[in-house]
Every structure is written in structure tokens, then in C-alpha cells.
Amino acid sequence: MYAAERCGSLIVVASSKDPWGPYENPVETKLGFDPGVLVDDDGKVYAFWGGCAAPCYIAELEDDMATIKEETLVSNPMGHANCPWDPKDDGHIDLIDAFFEASSPRKVLGKYVYIYSARYEKPIPELGIFEDCNGFLSYKFSDSPFGPYRDGGNISFNGGEILRDSEGVGTMTYRWGNNHGSIMEVNGKWYVFYHRHTGTTEYSRQAMLDPVDVALGTDGRLFIGDIKFLAGEPVSAKPVEMTSQGAHINGLDARKWISAGYACHIFGSKKNANIRPVYDERDDVSAPIDLITDGTTVGFRYLQFGNNTPKTVTLILEESKKVKINLRVDSYRGRIVSVLTSDGLSKEITGSLNTGIIGKRAVYFEFISEDKEEVFTFDRFTFD
């Protein structure tokens, strides 16, 4: 296990007889920030590291998995970001698709894949990005662990559900922030593991996973993400959608209590609504959403209702307040299937459904208040 010490300035590698530890005998290495390590099919070991304005590096390691084979060291296999807090123009800055941090090498369908956190310094209107943004987990691929690496694309973006207008311009519904993670095949299905940002700073993070497609084109190009196929051939890929379901890829069980903090859509708050960081190690703890105001919608993709439609929906607020909440399905502007009203005497609000809901669906709670300055805290909800 490779671990960072001294605020990331020292990388050590420790060993164990079991994957779950205990890890012992840490050995100092010369690896740098955010290292990722790949053990190849032939047993050779490669390390990838670097961050922000510093170059990214690749090197083969000795059998001890700690010592760099200096003659193999490659610097700047791709351009790096123009780090705003540590600007350095070393001739390797890339303003379009820059390496930021979070090296994670993989070998996929015979290709060497360099997965990393990317920083864009160009607008991406279809995703609602009009400023510098490093909320992407991106990749490049090669036939050699040392490159050259071909452009791949973006696997995930942690800006939440993207709302697009008639001209295709997007609006994010979540606070983006730097993205770390990688992909892994589990029982024949690929997933991307990454994190999003729940609080008002980039240091409150929640682990996420979503299924991804992986395919190799006849021209040797590797596609990872939400892939578009034409006549059975992969032709393009875009970031997979950010969801609430995690490993429950058929949807969260609608008849269990669901934490408001699973939301992947928080939109319309006048006071920057956000998920409150929760650190208690108890299964019954919910992560509530604070600073909800009139007009805020909170969405969850996806819930699983099965073949039997529920009759009621129940929502818990942290404090009893007067409010009306419309439950919508499939879209934040979708059909209203229940109206929940509170007279301010109870934190628990229940409403009847006026239509059936079955299968895997997205649901949205729309908060409406006569007091435009009132704020609400949404704790959890369930059906029936």
C-alpha cells in the first residue's frame, strides 16, 4: 500500500500478508504527489505521479516496488495545468485538457490507460462550465506504459445532473470540485469510482461509483464512459451521468429510508444549499441538505419501485416549518405525483400519490414557501 506522509511530501510503501492489513515496514520512495501503481501482466511494476504545476512522471520500479529505475523515468507524458496558486511556464502547460493530479494507471483491453484529474481552462457550454474547472476524471491511452498517450476523453464529471436549454447550454446542479478515482471491472461489468464535494469547501467529499461502458474500436481507439455506438462500432463517449444510487445500479430501494445526502441534483436555492458533512460512524445517520429555500428542487437518480406502486411518500425535515413540497417524477419539471403540506407542527410530512410509479425512476422534491427568506433542512424520505 502506497501512503502519503508529511502532507504528501513523502510517499512510503508498506506491505501486508492480507489486503485488509495490518500494513507494516513502511519503506521510503522517491515517488511524488498522488502516486498510482500498475503491475503489468508480465510482473513489471510501473509508477505514475505528479500534481498541478509540477510535471507528471512515469517510471518502472525495481522488484522491491519502491526503487525507481532511473533510466526509465519519463517526464511530461502530457501537458499539465497552469496552476493558479503556483504558476510555472515550463513549456508543458496545456490549457485545453491539462493533467491536474490523481494519477491512476490501468490496463484495459490490452491498452495502457492513464486516468487522472483533468483541469480545463476553456468553456464547455454543454456542461455549464464557463470558468476554470477540474471536476473531471479523464483518461489517455497508449500501447506502451511510457506512451505516447492518445487523447481519450472524460469518464465522469462531478457537477451533478446537467440541465440543458433548447440550445444545448448546460447548468450544473451540484458543486463541482477536484475529482479523484479510477475504473475497475467487477463480475464482467465496469464501474468508475470517484468523489464529489458535499459541503461549502472542497474538503468535504463523498465517495461515489457509477457503471461505465468500455469498448475498443477497430482503429484501436479505447472508449470509456457513456459510449455511443453506430452499427455496433463505438464512435464517441461522454462522461457518465452522476447518480444517487451508487452500487445499487438498479435503483435505491424506494421503500427504505433514503438520506437526503444521496441527492445528485440540488438546484434553485437562494442561499447555496449543500449537503452537511457527517462523520458519525452509525448506519442510522442521515446527511441532511441545509439552506433549502423557496424554489429549490432536490433530485435523486434513481429509485427502484418494483412492480407495486406505493400509496404514500413521507419526508422528514430537521425542524418543523410551514412548507409545501411537490413530488415530481423523471424531471425536475416533471409530472407532480404528490403534494406534501406542513402546517409547521411536525417534522414528518406525508402525502398520498395521485398516480402509480413502478420500475426505476428519478424523483424530485420541489420546495415552495410563502416566506421567501425561510430556510429548510431536508433529512430523509421513504415511500409507504
Image (cartoon, helix red, strand yellow):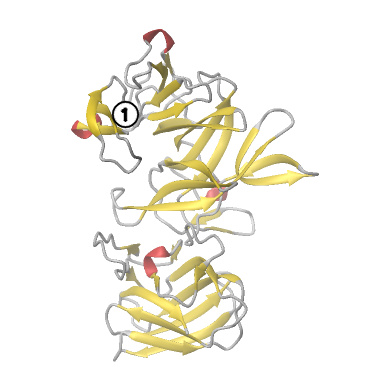
Q: Where's residue 253, x and y in %?
A: 49, 71
Residue placed most toward the observer, 178 or 169:
178
Q: How many marks?
A: 1
Which of the 4 quarters of the picture holds residue 62?
top left
Judged from this view, the residue extending furthest toward the left is 6
Judged from this view, the residue extending furthest toward the front is 17
Residue placed most toward the observer, 369 or 154:
154
Residue 284 seen in the current view: yes
Q: Where's residue 81, x and y in %?
A: 41, 29
- Residue at position x 21%, y 32% in the image: 5
Compared with residue 95, is residue 368 higher up or lower down, i.e. above or below? below
Which of the 4 quarters of the picture holds residue 27?
top left
Going by the numbered disc 1, the residue's amino acid type is Phe
Q: Where's residue 160, x and y in %?
A: 47, 56
SS at circle 1: loop
Q: Is residue 355 left or right of residue 375?
A: right
Compared with residue 29, is residue 213 higher up or lower down, i.e. above or below? below
Judged from this view, the residue extending furthest toward the top is 71
- Residue at position x 40%, y 75% in the image: 257
Residue placed most toward the observer, 180 or 176:
180
Compared with residue 290, is residue 234 higher up or lower down, i.e. above or below? above
Q: In the rendered image, which residue does mark 1 sit on? A: 33
- Residue at position x 66%, y 30% in the image: 221
Compared with residue 274, is residue 44 higher up or lower down, i.e. above or below? above
- Residue at position x 69%, y 46% in the image: 228
Q: Quadrant of the N terminus?
A: top left
Q: Residues within 10 Å of mark 1 (few under 14, many from 20)?
A: many
Q: Where's residue 116, x and y in %?
A: 45, 34
